[in-house]
Image (tube, rainbow, N blue to C red):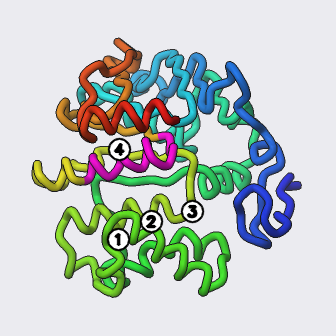
Amino acid sequence: MSSARTNPVGILGLQAGEEVNPLVDTAEAGPGVPLIRLRGIGKTYGQGETAFQALKGVDLDIAAGEFVAIMGPSGSGKSTTMNILGGLDQPSSGRYWFRGVEVQSLARDERARLRRRYFGFVFQGFNLLARTSALENVELPLVYRGEPAVARHAAAQRALEQVGLLSWAGHLPSELSGGQQQRVAIARAIVTQPQVLLADEPTGNLDSQRGHEIMELIQRLNLEQGITVLMVTHEVDIAAYAGRIVRFVDGRIASDGPNPDRVGLPPARLAAVTEAR
């Protein structure tokens, strides 16, 4: 039997009628407890002689409000780690805690609610519905949560305004540039007001100028709204927007540390926002 219950109006930042997970929604990452904690995470694909060990005992802590870039060559384990963090894949070994709750202890439907409630996803491919307007694409996560139409429209408009595309709400993806399509994808990811934004090569399909525009947007979401950002990238100039860089090699973390040369917002603004938070 599921441990979900129906959320009364107004608590937990959810809408009336939405199911919540008591284990996660009442948990708090208190002092000394990171938002995300991985210990000994391993992931193996296949069996026997054809088995491939993608992750080999990964330990990682991520505090609320961090902006972490995950780097590494192809096959190093960075995307596998991202999929496990977002609940899109399960580790073969090790333990994963979110807000102090062990994710493996959650049933499948509870993990699905965890994704809907706390995580927003941005991918290299924009994954927009071709025959659906920008506004309707942004509304999709709220449709899955059963939000009424009026609330969906208002939330989607706010999200599009945040990414500077409210005036394009009625346009189809084919009528938008690549950078605009990725902004719509980001609006769709943040329309549920997630705590964590997971971005997998978010600038991979964009030219250099549009890529940096998207990174400035993601950085503002992190610094001004406190959204925790975990981003996979192989581009050094894109990782430079993050406050911390984790490098993977052969399924293990090779290095993990702060980024002393963080770029993006003007240095004075960056320091002021960071200090205020």
**Magenta span:** 214-228
Instruction: Point out the frontmost of discs 2 and 4.
Output: 4
Percent x, y for residue 128? 35, 71
What is the spatial separation of the Cα atoms under label 3 and label 1, in whole angstroms? Answer: 17 Å
Q: Main secondary structure of the magenta part?
A: helix
Q: Secondary structure at mark 1?
A: loop
* Residue that label 1 marks: 128
Task: List x then y, in percent, for residue 53.
Answer: 43, 23
Q: Nearer the viewer, residue 54 or 69?
A: 69
Query: Looking at numbered disc 1 in the image, what kind of residue is underneath it?
Result: Leu
Label drawn at residue 188: 2
Dot 1 alpha-carbon crowd within 10 angstroms: few under 14, some 14 to 19, many 20 or more: many
Q: CA distance from mark 1 to mark 4?
A: 22 Å
Please say whether residue 216 is visible from this viewpoint.
yes
* Rendered view: 138 above or below 55: below
Q: Are marks 2 and 1 in contact (CB under 8 Å)?
A: yes
- Residue at the left extreme? 208
Q: Amino acid at mark 4?
A: Gln
> Label 3 sits on what residue type?
Thr
What kind of element bears circle 2? helix
Mark 4 or 3, closer to the camera? 4
Q: Which residue carries the number 3 mark?
A: 192
